[in-house]
Image (cartoon, grey):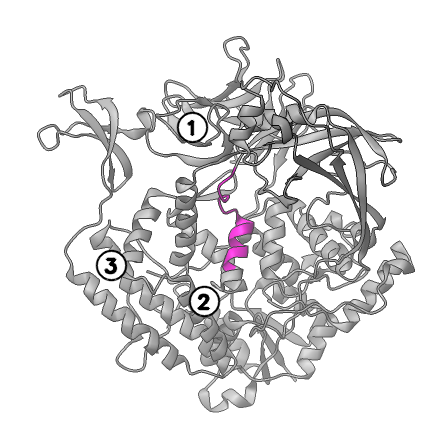
Amino acid sequence: MNTLIIVESPAKAKTIHKILGKEFSVKASIGHIKDLPEKELGVDVENNFKPRYVVIPGKEKIIKELKKASKDSDRVFLAPDPDREGEAIAWHIASVVSEKKSLNEKIYRVTFNEITERAVQEAIKNPGRIDMNKVEAQQARRILDRLVGYGLSPLLWRKVRKGLSAGRVQSVAVKLIVDRGREIEAFKPEEYWSISAEFEGSKPPTFWARLYKIEQRAESKEQRFLIPNENTATAIVNDLKDKEFILSNIERKHKKRMPQPPFITSTIQQEAARKLRFTAKRTMMIAQQLYEGIELGEEGAVGLITYMRTDSHRVAPEAQEWARKLIEKIYGKDYIPERPPVYKSKASAQGAHEAIRPTYPDKGPEEIKKFLTKEQYALYNLIWNRFVSSQMAPAQLEQTTFIIDNLPTPPIIPPYPPLEKGGWGDLKKGYSGGFEKGEGGAISRSPSYEFRASGTIVRFDGFMALYTEEKDELEDENGFTLPSLKEGEKLKLLNLQPKQHFTQPPPLFTEATLVKALEEKGIGRPSTYATILSTIQDRKYVQKTDGKFSPTELGIIVNDYLVERFPELIDVSFTAKMEDELDRIEEGKMKWVKVVKDFYKPFNSELAEATKTSERVKPKDIPTDIVCEKCGLYMVIRWGRHGRFLACSGFPECKNTKPLESQQSTISGQPSNEICEKCGAPMVIKSGKYGKFLACSRYPECKNTKPLSTGIKCPKDGGDIVERCSKRGKPFWSCSNYPECKFATWYKPVSKNCPKCNANFLFEKRNKEGQTVLFCHKKECGYKEVEKETSEEAVPVEAV
């Protein structure tokens, strides 16, 4: 019996053919073969939103080959990926390779969550039919995105500028980034102080503790603990200097730290971003390679992980069994839990899938490292360690907390200390209720102070022997191990350290935190996260600097317009509700036409109303102190088709313009993690005549600036290497201590130690073939390496 198997990827086809042998013919469709037409809507809104699918340009030859192979076969197994997209691909393939009369007789659907011999053989023995609920869920999503794209894009062309486009889910992601940027801009830092004390007990070592609370003895009532300024901190320090302290209590708590569950799509993207600095797009591309199959020498192509688009933490019993045997062999019986752990998954249409895990117990990362690229090995090692650790016993921790109180001191008899800075007067101003007058006019030192120091001891490391998600703090916060002391013993005060702090704004989104936010808010699904992140960057609505997302001027303008005109469309809760309805279509609980119709009616009404208005969206001019050299008026920053530029405020009488890059930027700049050492406000990244630099966000009240450091130290004097720009606009790198240090280079420094001489950084350049070349900054070393460029597959976005 001739059997044809059709998958969507050549790599997947190769792995499956190796498993099934010559009796089976395996072909690849290279992704979708049909889609909505590129240059027209392709949806009949008057006829229940009936879509018109056409053959994707360039796929004619593939379809011809698939038709021929199908005619020569007795059975056709459609085996694209086990998700909505895969089901839609299978449906479109079925519609072109077989006549409709024989569709249900000859065409079968097979799915497998892992490409292993067991899974593939089992799927072939138990073929099914195409799941039309999944097809309709994918079709509904595609139609919704097409209606939004073809409705909003022409509107944005008229109202903002030509060439713009909008997407149903991507616009909500942009809104999250814009809102976070504004939250940061509106944030006002508040000053506060902390006080740490170094104590010595009967046994070494010394240790640090932090002032935890202040309690007023006279009323036996705890005060709101806040040290708002330096005067208050100084007064408290002065009061503490002469006090005696006692270790009043030792709290010991035994805790279990449970292992993290195996990866799902969102968590692998977050962890790969944190630990490997991979984008979501690159993570999914490499995971796809590991799933579809890697050539392992004479063994041939082998699928190394289960399907990587999943919401489920479920693990097959046989996988749990081999993991337990492996753990016992490497770590011993103590590291195996009594029962295999069960991790809860949120309710989802993808709950039938497994978590992302390795497929073979004998193919550990080190055993097959020589067959993998650097990135494949890094991601496979991450998946392997996460899965195996998820099947290990919990860690047993003991947390110890020292509670330290001061002993009461006798009252101060008049005359009182002078009311000067650092004296009782300042303290009374800064800390209400801190000191009171006692009998006979004496001032009683009424507050009592409580310090705390905590440390954690690992009694049994459990899963932590293999994997931890984040750095575990096993010592007290100042980095000192707590000594073995007894309750009630007196402590000697060695040192007091007041420290100034400022409240911090919420951080900018990274790849990891944005994926987490999308998942928590129900925006998109596992298969769409990477597409969302790449699309909003491709459209120039957001930019990523040092791994952090910030909105562009264009993104802010488009977002504000959509929020004003289409508030429901880009409302987070509304978008999450749409995703839930798509899941219900897949589960057979809703009809796709009703979902699309309920969405389109109010959307079309808002679209018609917005189209009636004739106003164009233009941001306001931003005044500058730059004088126009032609007429003497001040210039303003305006926004045009190609972004911001400088224009004379006397327009149209004076039409002088110039590029904004040629002048020091006066706009807010990009947020950074730096804090201004003069006023404590956040610093922002700005562009000036000689490149990027850090400036205080409170300009012009605070005019503090400093060079933007690369984080690499100068090899000559240890200063920071900073990026600058020559008079002709060419970037170069030099020491921040110029002109004292003359170190400078045209080559970009990379924070990577030289493998040969261990120098603290390498230089980067491009060779004639376009490859990235890294070489040591020490000429005498001579180390050089050529980094392999990994091509990225195109990510589909809405056709607009």
- Distance between the alpha carbons at the discs numbered 2 and 1: 38 Å
Residue found at x 62% / y 50%: 272
Assign the C terminus to one quadrant of the image.
bottom left
Residue 361 covered by magenta stretch: no
Q: Secondary structure at mark 1?
A: strand
Count residues near mark 2 (Cα–Cα under 10 Å), then give few for <14, some for 14-19, many for 20+.
Answer: many
Q: 1 above or below 272?
A: below
Instruction: Report x, y in % for residue 452.
Output: 72, 39
Q: Range of the magenta residues?
A: 503-518
| 82 to the left or right of 171 | right
Q: Secondary structure at mark 3?
A: helix
Q: Earlier in the sequence, mark 2 or mark 1?
A: 2
Foreground: 341 or 751?
Answer: 341
Q: Which residue is mark 1?
A: 696
Callouts 2 and 1 close, C-beta under 8 Å: no
Q: Nearer the viewer, mark 1 or mark 3?
A: 1
Q: Which residue is mark 2?
A: 576
Specify whether residue 510 is in view. Answer: yes
